[in-house]
Image (spheres, grey):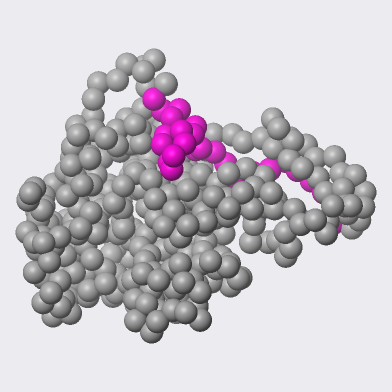
Amino acid sequence: MATMATPSTQVVIPKPCISASHRISQSSIAHFGNETKGTSWRKLGSSSLMSSIQSFSKTYHCKPLKFERCAIKAVSRESDKQPLPGLPIDLRGKRAFIAGVADDNGYGWAIAKSLAAAGAEILVGTWVPALNIFENSLRRGKFDESRVLPDGSLMEITKIYPLDAVYDCPEDVPEDVKTNKRYAGSANWTVKEAAESVKQDFGTIDILVHSLANGPEVSKPLLETSRNGYLAAVSASSYSFVSLLKHFLPIMNPGGATISLTYIASEKIIPGYGGGMSSAKAALESDTQVLAFEAGRKHNVRVNTISAGPLRSRAAKAIGFIDMMIDYSLENAPLQKELTADEVGNAAAFLSSPLASAITGAVVYVDNGLNAMGVGVDSPVFKDLDIPKAQKS
């Protein structure tokens, strides 16, 4: 059995030599879910205009949606301090800790890529049982295609820390967990120990990202959820954010930013999203406001959460109906396109940057506008209405 990595393990993947033509072909491809998609370093914009006073019984003529590449530029050399053109997202000299990255398939990975593209140094906290597989996959180049940044270079992860955010400090860890073979060989993996290790290794950080959620009974309706299942969902998915801030705020530089990930089930009914997960997301959003006040007053650190739309990630597949949620969004959201992880990553880069210096305590929706809809327009009851469809560009 492979030995589990310790907190001192440092994973820095050297950048390969890539020709100009090879860079172009690689930088246009990223893997998320089971499909290969073009990287979406694009502005979230639409040229569609529609009068708010016209009746739905009329025919609307929508202009084609046009998307342009975003102006985020990857800066891999710390010595390169030349000013960027326009209004850039510039995170050079900043250090980010992203909790909850275990593969190249979810929002946590996409956020790490966007922060790296803007010049930030990346540290990662990975769930202990998944740590060995994640590190080996990085070393073997399994994620190389997903690591390609807009300039053709590869995202580098300076260091990976074992982390189980369900436990705040060593005293909280039950004996049966300590002796579990999946945790054997991994020391210093509670939230407090992870923060202390980062402080010892790097001193401070500027950005903290919470990309953690787990509900052991997520497939059960709320009425069938046990007390233990409900509390486990809240512990892993919402209190873990409180714990991260509690232990990492003391090592965050003033003006820093923290971000978590939430879901519209916190405020609207999503049948099938059970096990107390909807309650956990509601708690996370409420905590975001309180933490924004406390962290802002005490540490001058901003606290926001991104309400992301459905993504065909490995974690989402555990719910069992992610494909239906994506299809529903495609039919009903104002922007009729599939959401990509990069779009959430770009929003996180903006919220982490000085461009968002006055934004805190906010729930930022990155879901193609689905949160704004009061009804599902694909319902048969609307079959007689001439509802516009997005034109193919």
Residue 137, horizontal then vertical, whole percent: 22, 40
Q: Which residues are magenta?
A: 26-52
- The quarter of the rendered structure image containing the C terminus is top right
Query: Which quadrant would residue 325 be assigned to in this image?
Result: bottom right
Q: Pick the residue in front: 187 or 385.
A: 385
Q: Is residue 27 magenta?
A: yes
Q: Is residue 187 magenta?
A: no
Left or right placement of residue 384 versus residue 294 in this view: right
Q: Residue at x 67, y 52 (%)?
A: 333
Where does residue 346 sit, x and y in percent of width and height?
Answer: 47, 47
Viewer-closest of 107 and 232: 232
Of the pair 200 and 327, the residue shown nearer to us? 327
Q: Is residue 240 visible?
A: yes
Relative image position of residue 180 (x, y in whole percent): 12, 66
**Does residue 93 appear in this view?**
no
Q: Residue at x 34, y 44 (%)?
A: 104
Q: How many numbered circles are shown?
A: 0
* Residue found 48% across the figure and 64% down from its top: 262
Q: Position of residue 213 (x, y in %)?
A: 38, 65
Seen at 29% across and 20% down, the residue is 18
Residue 336, compared with residue 174, is above or below; it is above
| Left or right of 224 on screen, residue 386 | right
Residue at the outermost bottom position = 227
Q: Main secondary structure of the magenta part?
A: loop
